[in-house]
Image (cartoon, rainbow, N blue to C red):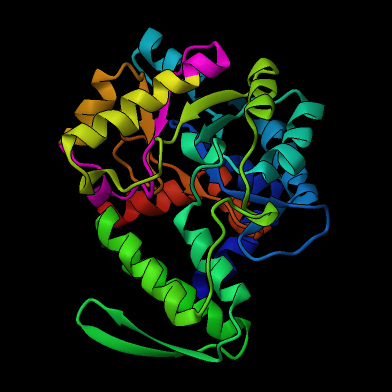
Amino acid sequence: MLKKRIIKIITSSGILLKVLNMVASDMPRVFVWHRFAAPMENRNGRVSADLFGWQLDRIRQDFQVLSLGGMLDYYNRHGKWPKRCVVLTIDDGYHDFYQWAYPELKKRCMKATFFATVNFVEGKIWLWPDRVRWALDTTLMSEVTLMFHDEMRRFPLNGLHDKDIFWKSCSDHCITLSDDKKEMFIRSMEEALQVSCPDIPTEEYRAVTWDELRELNEDGIEIGSHTMNHPILSKINQSRLVDEIEVSKKVLEENLNTKITSFCYPNGRFPDISDEVVRTVRDSGYLGAVMCIYSLEWQIYKIPRMGVSSDRENFLWKLYGAEKLLHSKRKE
C-alpha cells in the first residue's frame, strides 16, 4: 500500500521526522495503552516491556512528557495547549502495567496517567472483553451458535484465528448493547460455550491492588477515574451516571488520599459520550476527560488520543505528527 511505503520512508529518516515535527508541533500527542507483556514477549494486543522502553526513549528525544493533569493545568493557565508535548495514558487498571510498564517509566523518571476502574481494582468485576476471551480460551467446543440481535450465527472455533474472529464479533456486538443486555448476551455466550466464569478475574486478567495503586500515586503516576464498572456511559441513566462518574472519583480520592482531576470515558467513541455524560463529568469536579479516538477537534472534556501497538513505524508516524496532518488533509 502507498501509505505504508510513505510511512516507512518518513520514519526511517531522522531529518524528515524533525521536519514533520516542526510542521505539526502545535498540539500535544496523547497516547493510550491498555496491556503490557514481559520483555521480548510477542502477545497480541500487548506492548512488551522492552518495546515500551524504546517508545519512551524515542519520546524523550524530542518531546516534553506531561501527565494529563499537567497538560490540563497548562491549558487552564495559558488558554492554549502546550506544544511538542506527549501525554502517556493507560486505561483500565491492569496489573501488567504495574509489573512491566511502570518500571520502565520509573527508571526514566517519566510521568504518565493511569485510569483505574474502581470495582475492577476492588476485585468485584471482570472487564467484559476479558470474560469473552477467558471463555474462548477455556471452552472445549469446536463451534458455537449464538443469537446476535435477531440473527442466529454460527462460528467455528478450531484455532486462534477462528477464536479471534468470534471475539471481535462479540466485542462489536456488545458495544451496541445496554449494560443489562450485554450481561445477558455474555451469559448466553458462556452457556453456549459450556464454561462458567469465575467470580474473580484470574491472574491473566487481574487489576492492580490498592497498595500498588497507592505506590504508583506516591511515585508520581497520576491516577484518573475510569468509572466504577466500565459501562458505556451514554447507555445508562442519570442515577447510574452519578455513581459511575462522581462516586468513582470520591472512592479513589478516599483510598489514595489525593485529588482526582482526570477522567476517561469507557470505550470512548463519540456515540458513547453524550452531552449529559460530559455535563456530569464537568459537574463532578474533573478538570478534563479523554476519548479513545483521534479527532482534530480538541475540547477539554473530549481530548482525543491515539492508540499504540507494537508497530514501531506506526508509532513514530503518530509521534511526529503525521496522523494529525493526515486528518487535516481529509477534512479539507
Q: Is residue 191 left or right of residue 301?
A: right
Q: Position of residue 42 (x, y in %)?
A: 75, 64
Q: Residue furthest top?
A: 77
In the image, 121 versus 111, the foreground residue is: 121
Q: Is residue 188 left or right of residue 49?
A: left
Q: Quadrant of residue 134?
A: bottom right
Residue 26 is left or right of residue 18, and the answer is left
Q: Residue 313: x and y, percent? A: 64, 58
Residue 279 in view in this figure: yes
Residue at 78% x, 36% y is 104
Q: Is residue 317 magenta?
A: no
Give the image location of residue 236, x and y in percent: 22, 44
Q: Which residues are magenta?
A: 253-275
Instruction: Look at 37% across and 35% down and name the residue there.
Output: 303
- What residue sits 41% from the left and 46% below the top? 292
Q: Which of 199/167 is in front? A: 199
The location of residue 216, given as percent across then percent down, is 67, 24
